[in-house]
Amino acid sequence: MSISLKEINATNWYECTELSVSEEQKKIFPVSVVYWMASSKYEYNNELELLAVYDENLIVGVVAYGIDPDIDAPWITTVMIDEKYQGKGYGKEAVKQLIDLIVKRHHYKKIMIGHRPNNDVAAKLYESLGFHEIKQTEDEVVRCLQL
């Protein structure tokens, strides 16, 4: 496995839109990659960095982050690995690389991430990477990685 994160641009955007998760996962969070593309441009005014997750020349997923001005910290908003590539370590490696990228580009003391309360796979993944639960609501578990 040779994972890298690359900008989504005119040459790879359509391939990213073809990524999908399982029907079971769509029940947890029914948002497609197209939503994140539109959201990054229009809801976040191009302030959300959306990146394709590659294994060599193959796109296997998408990750995104932005700086949350309310808490003055980076927030990882998206970690999505296509259902065909799940369970192979791509998500963990992609989040590790995203953390490294955020640390290189920014000088914050923490990184935030959230997931649905019933998403046990995400909970285990983020815990294994050092994200500690700091808050839970009906809709979201908020986690923080102290740097």
Image (cartoon, rainbow, N blue to C red):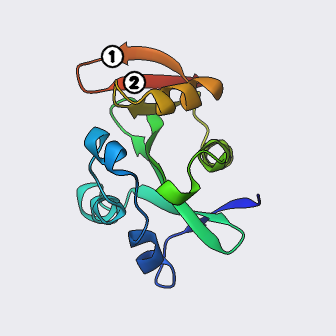
Asked whether the viewer can see residue 126, the reply is: yes
Is mark 1 in CB contact (under 8 Å) with mark 2?
yes
Quadrant of the image occupied by residue 40:
bottom left
In the rendering, at what x and y percent does residue 55 appear? 68, 64
123 in relation to 102, above or below: above
First in sequence: mark 1 or mark 2? 1
Residue depicted at x 23% and y 20%:
138
In the rendering, at what x and y percent does residue 38 appear? 28, 65
Viewed as shown, does residue 86 lie left or right of 57? left
The residue that label 1 is drawn on is 136
Quadrant of the image occupied by residue 46:
bottom left
Residue depicted at x 51% and y 24%:
144
Residue at the right extreme of this rendering: 2
Residue depicted at x 36% and y 44%:
25
Asked whether the viewer can see residue 147, the reply is: no
Q: Is mark 2 on a helix, strand or loop?
A: strand
- What amino acid type is highlighted by mark number 1? Gln
For residue 142, which numbered disc appears in the image? 2
In the rendering, at what x and y percent does residue 79 appear? 48, 47
In the picture, the quarter occupied by the C terminus is top right
Q: Distance between the residues labelled 1 and 2?
A: 6 Å
- What amino acid type is highlighted by mark number 2? Val
Q: Residues within 10 Å of mark 2 (few under 14, many from 20)?
A: some
In the rendering, at what x and y percent does residue 88 appear? 66, 48
Residue depicted at x 24% and y 63%:
42
In the picture, the quarter occupied by the N terminus is bottom right
